Amino acid sequence: MEYGLITVAAAIPQVRVADPEFNLRAIEELVARADGIGVEVVCFPELSLTGYSCQDLFFTQQLLTKADEALRGLLEFTRGRDVIAIVGMPVATGCQLLNCAVVVQKGEVLGVVAKSHLPNYNEFYEKRWFVSANEIKPATVSIAGHSVAVSGEPRLFVTAGGARFGIEICEDLWAPEPPSGTLALAGADIIFNLSASNELVGKHTYLMSLLAQQSARLICGYVYSGCGFGESTQDVVYGGNAMAYENGKLVAEGKRFSLEPQLLVAQIDVESLRTERRANTTFSTSTSAMAATVIQANATRPRSFAMLRSVEPWPFIPHGTAMEASCEEILSIQAHGLATRLAHTRCRCVVLGISGGLDSTLALLVCVRAFALLGLPSDGIVGVTMPGFGTTGRTHRNALALMQQLGVAQREISIAASVGQHFADIGHDPAKHDATYENSQARERTQILMDLANQLGGIVVGTGDLSELALGWATYNGDHMSMYGVNAGVPKTLIRHLVRHVAATMADGTIRATLLDIIATPISPELIPVSEAGEMTQKTEDLVGPYELHDFFLYHFVRHGFRPAKIFMLAQCAFDGSRPGAGPYDAPTIRHWLTVFFRRFFSQQFKRSCMPDGSKVGSVSLSPRGDWRMPSDASVSVWLKECEELPIS
């Protein structure tokens, strides 16, 4: 397990009912494939050595003997291999028969787990042959020449890399209290399910929902392997379901109704799961009373790491069919947050600076929605353009056009004279374009907005976004300050999509054209004088770095707590040029901006410690009252040291 990732697989072999020798050969083929590509744990379907649909043949000694011989063959086959294989077979203990998962590695039986919940309704009648694990006394059984303990107590297996996994069998998942709950609370990072669930109309959709919910509720990986081609179709059909979930998300899915054997390989991020569990006190405080028998797997040979899972370059952005609904939901959260604040303060007026850029555009659109919710007239929204030394004609025109098209009140107050006077008051040379030059403009604009809000009996709506808060890309007590920050939970990469969503749903073509031009405008604070041609000379991403990289770093650092080395590796996978529109960025570039990110994130915490109220919209928030609490004087040295040591050749 490297970078906290473990490679697992769900295997669906072809099966012959009641033919353990044939089934052994089919299982061996998939075990060899799995071991050859570095899979650490591979899970086979329920009763895979015999076939699930043997019915009363489970009563015959011949089948049980041949199953035991097949297991001996599998042990011999795995003797020189590292992969852990989980296979299903009937196991006799005294006068009882158990439906079991057998865990094998390097020629040894690591453990046996018996099925707890036996379906005995409709097409299922397992209690005719098997006894539940909940109904047996602890015993030692002999299987394939090994003496193995069998009981109803939970068992936890630990791989050589330290990943912990538990096992449940088919119906166990469908029970009111699945064993996986106990196993996860006892420390299982991943649950493997050996299944023989048959296909019915609508059942697959329900199964996927069940797997997603269970993996999310338990904050775990969940690997599901179901019986497929070759099982008896006397009365039912088995579709060969193979799926892998991670904390509610489907990370890999096989092909249903395939006539060919399948090996579905997935990587589960155990480190991410453990971080999530530690942060979730509801989960972590529930683990204290849970215990399980722990079984350590054998040591394995070192292998070179290979990243097998796709890495999303824009983790904040919803994709596919979820895009429209997610954008609408985010806008609703923002608008309802502002509407509640206005109702609480009995305020019928908001004041905000409109620059013609993305952030202020989104904030204005949110204000319009909030006023519509409250039934307030749109002229209570006061948009203020405050042209300064770096304002371009394009952004100024878009700001004026948007306010006019949305029907809000407009004010224009130039800051040139007042800032010029301020430079004279403090003895600053206007030709020196330093932090004083830039921040004086930002603070003057904020003073205008605050004083206007007092004059009009309104509140100042902040336009700064989550990405700017992370990087501290805001003037302290300037654009850093407001009375309610509607964009505080929205990262820069998402804002463009939200504005585009509004543009796409606008009936008015003129508004749509203005919004699309704003989207196409480079991001800039417009604090440095324009060129002789009137073009902007200051582009934010040239100065602070690409926002798509910084948002990627922010997500994986705050959401998962990953160290620089892992974020660096993930970024290389995400921005290698294989995804249209993502990068590409080479290793030196990624390392450079990752270093900038950590340096700025730590040094700028003091701005976040006193940030205004604002609504959280996603899983990452930097509010000091909510999700992110950090000393303003915390040292960044250990993070920067690891950044410096990252390999770039």
Image (tube, rainbow, N blue to C red):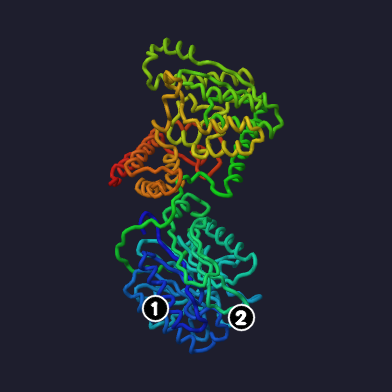
- Residue lying furthest right: 375
Placement of 400 over or under 271, stated as above or below = above
What is the x, y in percent for residue 368? Answer: 64, 31
What residue do we see at 39% from left, 47% from top?
Answer: 576
Placement of 534 over or under 606, stated as above or below = above
Left or right, 519 with reference to 508: left
- Give the amino acid at mark 2: Gln
For disc 2, the marked residue is 234
What residue do we see at 49% from left, 39% from top?
Answer: 493
Query: Helix or strand or loop: what does disc 2 sit on?
Result: loop
Determine which of the numbered discs, if any, sits on residue 74 in the image: 1
Q: CA distance from mark 2 to mark 1?
A: 29 Å
Q: Which of the 4 quarters of the picture holds residue 345? A: top right
What is the x, y in percent for residue 70? Answer: 42, 82
What is the x, y in percent for residue 305? Answer: 34, 58
Mark 1 is surrounded, within 10 Å at the Cα level, by few (under 14), some (14 to 19) or many (20 or more) other residues, namely many
What is the x, y in percent for residue 59? Answer: 54, 87
Give the camera-side residue of 281 and 173.
Answer: 173
What residue do we see at 60% from left, 65% from top?
Answer: 204
What residue do we see at 53% from left, 73% from top?
Answer: 228
Q: Earlier in the sequence, mark 2 or mark 1?
A: 1
Query: Helix or strand or loop: what does disc 1 sit on?
Result: helix
Q: Can residue 489 be seen from the camera position used here? A: no
Give the camera-side residue of 301 and 304.
Answer: 304
Give the camera-side residue of 17 and 597.
Answer: 17
- Give the amino acid at mark 1: Leu
Determine which of the numbered discs, if any, sits on residue 576 in the image: none
User: Mark 2–mark 1 contact, CB under 8 Å?
Assistant: no
Q: Nearer the viewer, mark 2 or mark 1?
A: 2
Placement of 272 over or under 599, stated as above or below = below
Q: Can residue 106 be seen from the camera position used here? A: yes
Mark 2 is surrounded, within 10 Å at the Cα level, by few (under 14), some (14 to 19) or many (20 or more) other residues, namely few
